Amino acid sequence: MTVQQAAQRLLAMDQVLILTHRRPDGDTIGCAAALCHALRQKGKTAWVLPNEDAHGLFTPYFDGVLAPANFVPQEVVAVDAAAQGLLPASAKPHCSTISLTIDHHGSQEYFAEETCLDASCAACGELLYQIFQAMAVTLTPKIAQLLYMAIATDTGCFVYSNTTPATHRIAAALMDTGFDAQWVNKRHFRTKSLKRMQLESRLVQEMELAQNGTLVFAYVTLDLIASLGASEEDLEDISSFIGLLEGVDNAVTIRQLAPQECKISLRTDGKHLNASAVCAIHGGGGHAAAAGCTLFVSPKEAKAQMLAAIEQVQCHG
């Protein structure tokens, strides 16, 4: 479905429920809230489904948009979700009736009735900006702030390799509306809790290097989280940290969710190693430079399996 078709489909909707993905990031939350406000601007009833995984860092963006328990939607839209399995448990009653998915992941599984996908976008927020233009949505400072947050968080404040000239042009257009971009950037990129700093220190101490120092593995274990008393907010975007190490091209962060369950985040340069291809070996996916999967093994076994997958993709280059 093209941007124009998605715009027309959204304009034809009413009584809309908007879904975010599990362990929501800034892109899915910013897009969901922005779409909610945009639809309301067009005279529609729209709400965002509460996400049980969301933490306090994103609380301000949910103001006034979370669906009441008795809301019965006529249409359901998912944003920034590549697969039905990535939706939270609260979305289960709606999984079979998703009208439209708006996404930017090349690993999209086309689980909705219709899909608007552009994998060239650095963030789903970029694609939604284009859809809003086609819908003739007025970019209020509130809507612009939400889209800016979505794009900024998915590009690491515009430093990741997915950032393009178009990304900057869209960000500039959003900033022209006059919202406080400094507040967004300070909140997400220039403020760290003491526990977060302690966590980063432990990751550096306990990380493991491979492939002549170009590949690094970091472990966020249950024991580590418990010892620091770290919260989900302290762990936000932790997968981007270890790749800052000089000489590292590829970084694997292994987040232990249960004794035999690990969430894997792989970050690469996107050119010499396709992160999505590696994670697809284990049923995951994402982008060329950032992807993930879940392994039902211990952290040490997760490292062995990811190293084997990386070597497999490298060998078949």
Image: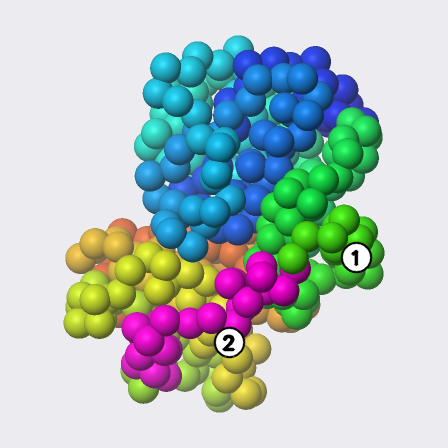
The image shows residue 28 at horizontal and vertical percentages of: 53, 43
In the image, is residue 249 above or below residue 298?
below
Which residue is depicted at the point 51% across and 76% down? 243
Asked if residue 186 lies in the magenta stretch, the reply is yes
Q: Main secondary structure of the magenta part?
A: helix
The residue mark sitting in front, 1 or 2, is 1
Tell me the magenta residue range. 181-204
- Residue toward you, 27 or 164: 27
Which residue is depicted at the point 50% across and 31% down? 65
Badge 1 element: helix
Judge from the rendering whether residue 78 lies leftward or rightward of residue 181; answer left or right. Answer: left
Badge 2 element: helix
Mark 1 lies on residue: 172
Mark 2 lies on residue: 243
In the image, is residue 263 above or below residue 100?
below
Q: Please, what is the three-letter code of the amino acid marked with disc 2?
A: Gly
Labels 1 & 2 near each other (Cβ < 8 A): no
Question: Can the viewer see residue 3 in this picture?
Answer: no
Q: Please, what is the three-letter code of the amino acid marked with disc 1?
A: Ala
Name the image quarter holding the N terminus.
Answer: top right
In the image, is residue 230 above or below residue 216?
above
Question: Can the viewer see residue 35 in this picture?
Answer: yes
Q: How many marks?
A: 2
- Residue toward you, 172 or 107: 172
Distance from Cα at disc 1 to Cα at disc 2: 28 Å
- Residue toward you, 144 or 14: 144
- Residue toward you, 174 or 151: 174
